Amino acid sequence: MSKLHERLERAASGPVRPLGFSAGSRERIPVLAIIASIAKPTQKSVEAAVKAGAEFILVPAGATPKAPPGIGSTPWGARTEALTEKAHTALREAGCDFLFVLAGDTPLRLLNDDSIGYYGIVPADTDERRLRALERLPFEGSVIEADAGKDLTVGQAVEVSAAASRLTGPLLTMASIDWGSGEMEQLRDLGFVAVVVEVGDARGAARIADLREAILSVPLQSKRRRGRTAATVPTVSDGAAAPPPDEGDDDDFDE
C-alpha cells in the first residue's frame, strides 16, 4: 500500500485519533491531504512546498523519470498519460510512491505492481459509461480533474460531485492556492480527502502554508450534516383529514 493511500485512509476515518495512552491526548489530522503539483520541480520549489506543509509532491513522469530534487523523505508521485515499462521501472527504483494515470496508452499490466499506488485521473465531464469502466480498473482512488479558478463555483462543485458520486475509493480533486477554509470545508463535505494544488516557483510553493492553515480551521463536524433534519410524512395526527372508508357497492339499495 502506498503512503498516499495510508494517509487518505486516515483522513477518511476521521480528523481526530487517540495519541499515546492518555485519553486526553488526541492528534488532529487535517481533513484534506495536500499534494503540491510542480510542473518544473527545482530543489528550491520542492523544499519550499514541503516546508510550507505539502504532504506529497507530484511531478510529471517526464522522458527521464527520477525523484524530484530536494525531496528528502517526503513521499512523491508522478502524473502520466502514456507510461512505458522502462519509465515505470525507473520511477519505482527512484522511490515513486504513487502514479496519477490518465486513461491512454499505459499498459494495464503495470498497474499490478503493488509497490506503487495507482490513481485514475477522471476529467469532471467524463460520461457515465466511462465512469463505470474506470470503477473496474485496479485504482486505489480517483483524481477528479477540473479547473480551479479564483473561486469554487456552484457549477464546478456540481461537476466534480457528479463524477465523484459514481466512483468508490478515496477521492482527490484540484484546488486553488487562493482558496480558504470555506472552500476546503465544501470539498470535505462533498467527500474529498485530498487536494492537488499547482505551484510554480518557491514563492508560490510557500503559500501552501496558508492553505494548510485553512484546512486545519475546517470544523470537525460538517455544518451541512449538523443542520440537516429528517423529512417527515404527514399523518392524521398532524391535522390532515383521514380518507373516508371504502364502503364498497351496496347491493341492497332501492332504485
Image (cartoon, helix red, strand yellow):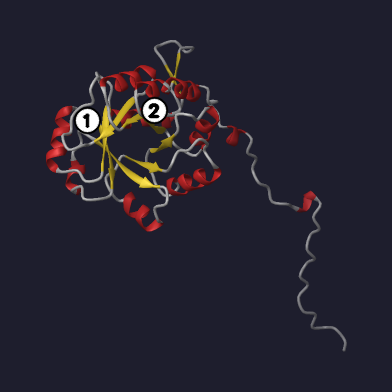
Mark 2 packing: few (<14 Cα in 10 Å), some, or many (20+)? many
Q: Position of residue 76 (x, y in %)?
A: 27, 28
Of all residues, the one furthest to the right in this rendering is 254
Quadrant in which the C terminus appears: bottom right
* Residue occupying image coordinates x 27% and y 45%: 138
Q: Position of residue 23 (x, y in %)?
A: 47, 13
Mark 2, secondary structure of its residue: strand
Mark earlier in primary sequence (1, 2): 2
Mark number for residue 171?
none
Q: Nearer the viewer, residue 251 or 75?
A: 75
Q: Amino acid at mark 2?
A: Ile
Of all residues, the one furthest to the top in this rendering is 22
Vertical arrangement, residue 59 with respect to residue 121, above or below: above
What residue sits right under mark 2 in the picture? 34
Q: Quadrant of residue 203?
A: top left
Q: Nearer the viewer, residue 156 or 188?
A: 156
Q: Amino acid at mark 1?
A: Cys
Mark number for residue 96?
1
